Amino acid sequence: KKFGGEEVYPGDIIARQRGFKWKSGENVYIGKDQTIHAKVEGIVKFRDSLYRKVPYKIVDVIPT
């Protein structure tokens, strides 16, 4: 798993998961087995959802 603030490249695996512990945000995509991958080169950022009744994390990649 990559942590917040780490640099990733296109196609890198950010997190493996079963089910949806984390949701995809900007510049990431989810593979067939719910693995989160980076679309672009950049820095990983985890953030909380704005809808607090069902709390979950959103994973983004900020382009560099």
Image (cartoon, helix red, strand yellow):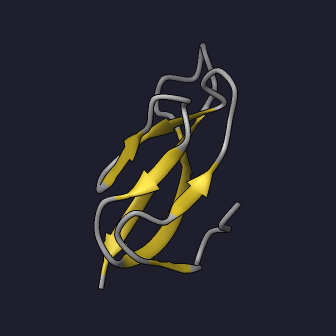
Residue at the image position 68 percent from the left and 68 percent from the top: 3
* Number of numbered discs overlaid on the protein picture: 0
Residue at the image position 30 percent from the left and 86 percent from the top: 64
Residue at the image position 61 percent from the left and 16 percent from the top: 54
Judged from this view, the residue extending furthest toward the front is 32
Does 59 sit above or below residue 6? above
- Where is residue 32 shown, x and y percent of the image? 46, 29
Q: Is residue 8 left or right of residue 53?
A: left
- Where is residue 17 shown, x and y percent of the image? 68, 35
Query: For residue 63, which quarter of the picture?
Result: bottom left
- Where is residue 30 shown, x and y percent of the image? 42, 38
Does 39 sit above or below residue 54? below
Between 60 and 30, the residue placed more toward the observer is 30
Does 25 sit above or below residue 34? below
Q: Quadrant of the N terminus?
A: bottom right
Q: Is residue 6 left or right of residue 41?
A: right
Q: Is residue 64 left or right of residue 49?
A: left
Residue at the image position 59 percent from the left and 79 percent from the top: 6
Between 38 and 4, the residue placed more toward the observer is 38
- Where is residue 50 shown, x and y percent of the image? 46, 32
Does 17 sit above or below residue 39? above
Q: Is residue 3 left or right of residue 7?
A: right
